[in-house]
Image: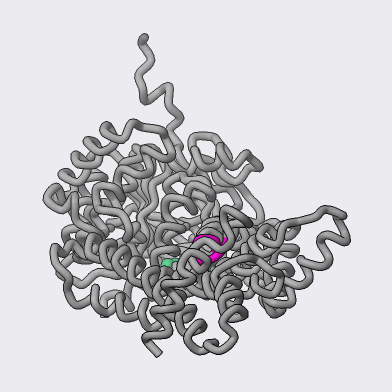
Amino acid sequence: MSTSAAETQPLQTIRLSDVCKSYGDYPVLKNIDAEVARGEVVVICGPSGSGKSTLIRTINRLEEINSGSITLDGQNIHAAMRTRELNALRSRIGFVFQNFNLFPHLSVVENVSISPVRVKGVAANVAHEKALKLLDRVGLADKAQAYPGQLSGGQQQRVAIARALAMEPPVMLFDEPTSALDPEMVGEVLAVMKSLASEGMTMICVTHEMGFARDVADRIWFIDAGQILETAPPEEFFKTPRHPRAQRFLADLRH
Amino acid sequence: MIHDVIAIIQDYWLLLLIGQYPNGPLGGLANTLILSALSIALAFPVSILLALARLSKWRLLRWPVTALVYITRGVPLLMLILWSYFLVPLWTGADVPSFVTMLTTLVVYQGAFLSEVVRAGIVALGSGQMDAARALGHSSLGAMRFIILPQALYNMIPSIISTFVSTIKDTTLGYVINVPDLTFAASQVNNQLLTQPFQVFFILAVVYYAICWSLTHVANLVERRITRRRAGLSGGAAPVLVSAKIVSEQL
Ligand SMILES: Nc1ncnc2c1ncn2[C@@H]1O[C@H](COP(=O)(O)OP(=O)(O)O)[C@@H](O)[C@H]1O
Ligand SMILES: [Mg+2]
């Protein structure tokens, strides 16, 4: 048993190879090549309409692609497969939406526990206990019996993170998780994301929170018009962006 | 007038309640209630299946069901009833009891109407709920069952109830193919009395009104309870009253 865990597991977790996608004639993603290593935090930024949401949604196949491949630990997510396999694959990729998309007819704790029970077949009482622990972790233990409609946006988004974590995914995707929030609630959601990152979660976050990107990201992907124009560590990206469009984007952001 | 009504009820209550039974088939109010309950109980699941088929990604499923729903909705119920009554025995050679003919026709007709309500409820939810369920690994049927339908059906309670109420009202059309229901019994009474049609059909109207009103009332209570639970309220508060009002306006 001399080989360590790091050696037995492949370093790359997610690899996108030559991914192309178009809506009709309109190309949204053009030849995307990128890699996310285990435990890495990637922040995707770029102007609105550049394809960030589309890109991140292709990673758990909420959107189909036209060509190329996306692999998670070597398994091609966009290969032809049985729906049951696809569902199992999806449950290993947590997704947090801009609009939370909590299930309004279920209480907070049911929101978190329903998927382990219905998808994984976890016993209801076990899933419930686990859900309470996760809610405690995002600071919402006292809201377990509340319904989503009774919570603030920040609280809802933290429940949404707990709901995704309940499936124990090795990877979490975030699509502008704080963009729908009032400014005073952004911090509480970012704090949860930061703690996740510090625990070694592999994360891909679309966000305009440049403070978060600077503090937490290992790498920034700058995307414009469906292409990744620049990938760089945050210090480098913010100080000396190479691509003119990245420079312009950062300049606009500072105004 | 009230006097006549009371006298009619005293003389004919058993006929109005159960028809000729046990000397003939079960009829009267009992049969109306059975026909209504069966129609609703069958039309409801049928409507969900039709709605899911219409939203299916498989054309082979979507197109025929869409055609069925359009045709059924575009034809008067009375015509459908006469069609099934005269043509089904011709085609199949089987002697179908008029009760079964009526029940089947009502289930298809109201199922088609209700499927549009259910479908609208599903579509109105938007894609976010389905996306969230799929991202968590739910199958499309699992997502429908645990995430989408509970919300879509709840949001559509007012329209669903008004479809149920019109199903009850539509059972009266069974009269034309001799389904021995309450309307049939009332017209028998009227034929015997000859001189008091207003009084007889007044009783009929009151009974139908009471049935439909009770159903709406029960639905109000159910909806109020769900709303209250979701709002985390202990007593009846403002939003509850608003939704109850929507239900009663549908009548
Ligand atoms: N379902 C769709 N059908 C057609 N075009 C779409 C659809 N979704 C997104 N688009 C287009 O694709 C482009 C990229 O969208 P999106 O990925 O949402 O960008 P971002 O998240 O960076 O703002 C936009 O021009 C948008 O209008
Ligand atoms: Mg977006």
Horizontal side, residue A126 vs residue A90: left or right: left
Front position in the image: B59 or A227 = B59
Residue B201, position as x, y percentages in the image: 51, 83
In magenta segment, residue B184 = no
Residue sitting at x 40%, y 90%:
B1
- Whether residue A29 is visible to the viewer of this picture, yes or no, is no
Q: Pick out the residue farthest to the left.
A: A142
Q: Is residue A115 above or below residue B202?
A: above
Residue B66, position as x, y percentages in the image: 69, 68
Overall secondary structure of the magenta section: helix
- Whether residue B141 is visible to the viewer of this picture, yes or no, is yes
Find residue A222 and report its image quarter: bottom left
Residue sitting at x 65%, y 73%:
B175
Find residue B104 and report its image quarter: bottom right
Front position in the image: B181 or A89 = B181
State which quarter of the image contains the C terminus of chain B: bottom left
Ligand 2: which quarter?
bottom left
Residue B127, position as x, y percentages in the image: 48, 64
Front position in the image: A149 or B114 = B114
Residue sitting at x 65%, y 56%:
A66
Residue sitting at x 15%, y 44%:
A136
The magenta stretch spans which residues?
B27-31
- Give the tally of numbered discs: 0
Find residue B56 and report its image quarter: bottom right
